[in-house]
Image (spheres, helix red, strand yellow):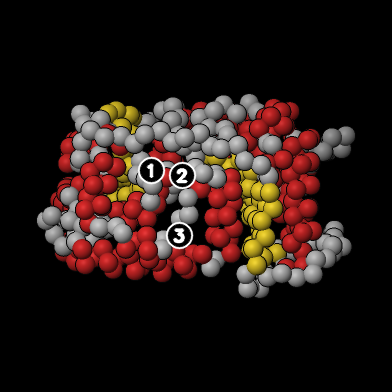
Amino acid sequence: MNDRTSPPPAAHGIYGGLLSAQGLDLQQREVIRTKVHTWRTDAGTGVTFVEARGLPIVDVVLRFNAGTASVDSPSLAALTLYMLDEGSLRFNAAEHAQRIERLGAVVEKQVRHDHATLSLRSVSTKALLDPAIELFTSLVAQPAFPAPALEKIKRQLVLHDAARARQPVLRARSEAYRHLFYDHPYGQPQESTTQVLDAVTPADLRAFHRRAYSATNLEMVVVGDLSRIEAQAMAQRISQALPQGWAAAELPAAPQTSGTTINIEQAGAGNAILLALPIDVPANDPEFLAVKLACEVLSVGSDSRLMKALRQRQGLTYGIYSQLVPKRVGGLFAIEWEIAPPYVKSSQALVEALLRDLVLHGPTEAELQLACQQLAGELLRTVAQNKRLAELLTETTQQGQPADHLNTYNDRLAELTPEAVRDVMQRRFDLTRRVLVSVGPVADQQPLPASDQ
């Protein structure tokens, strides 16, 4: 006979009455045991390596401190990166592309405020990996920067940036950065203009490359089917081929800006809205995880507070998402959503009220448990995939995390209490500095409709 004096373990809390969960310890998290090796090459490059023998694949990520904030002209940083696969001193662009394709390798690149990143994914078979590394190294270390290709890339960059500027979400982000990082490299306009690009020459690219793409300005991550000795030899080979002996200067501290509301009229069916808050909590700060949990509780997943309020109860948006963006200096906490034009102000007021309530009272125990489960599951999925693990290690290396960061992550999550999260939020979230940006058509404003629940 069942004991009817107490409900089954899964009959309450965040798991409801899920019968298949009865008898399971849903708070038990799988232990992460990722052996991370770190060292420096003779040329001064920091290397992070994880041996992963499950697949015959090797992922190599090169992250240079050569982002748009590292130079007076963001366009120079972008052009330098985009020109790297337009030919080297050995092969032209078509020859490089053909050789990479024949080897079954994939090269990707991206530029952000803090970094320029190039990655290579290759089969680990030596007969394919060695020539792939050789081609990848020649692209990064010995670019030709041909003038005809530069003119082509300039035209493409103007069109690309113009298209991004027309996207309401991206325009809202740009405006938030301009205010939050006023008179700081992060606040520079990222859009390229013909006038600015016309001034950039191949000689400018070579000069920037000699400095910013040096071995001492690089962090390298290697994950895959090879030994540490093989990874060391590979890292040494890449590092020695690069320019030597230069490292970027530290960025200035983030400015102390005040809160504001920015409304930008732009044609469209709806409005993109961004609430951004400066959060100066480095990712390797012990309090960063508490801020990350707060972000998870507020608007990550269908059970988050904002998703329940704006989508489930009132059906006003398909999704509302928050993101914590740590940067080399400073950082921000951002919430983004799209809404019908009549509900811009009322939805902003609701989001601000929910954020203020979380700061004031903190999360519930059930919300915190669910957030911890979500973050632990996300980490488990990441370390199970070589490419995603390489990307994560690249981030954590830039953040200055210790080598055991991944293995201790879940334990540090489990130590946090609702009270601890609330206390961190009350000290770290200054709501008077919030920036609200809306981009979209202007309409007469209405109160939120009655809730469905």
Residue indicated by mark 1: 70
The residue labelled by disc 3 is: 191
Disc 3 to disc 2, C-alpha distance: 14 Å
Please tell me how many numbered marks the rendered image carries.
Answer: 3
Residue pointed to by mark 2: 185
Kind of residue at disc 3: Glu
Q: Please, is residue 323 above or below residue 167 in the view?
A: above
How many C-alpha atoms fall within 10 Å of the one at disc 1: few (<14), some, or many (≥20)?
many
The secondary element bearing badge 1 is classed as helix
Residue type pointed to by label 2: Pro
Question: Picture coordinates of residue 372 (x, y %)?
Answer: 63, 37
Q: CA distance from mark 1 to mark 3?
A: 16 Å
Q: Are marks 1 and 3 in contact (CB under 8 Å)?
A: no
Which of the two discs, 3 and 2, labels the residue nearer the N terminus? 2
Q: Is residue 369 visible?
A: no
Residue contact between numbered discs 1 and 2, judged by CB atoms under 8 Å: yes
Q: Quadrant of residue 280?
A: top right
Image location of residue 267, percent across then percent down: 63, 73
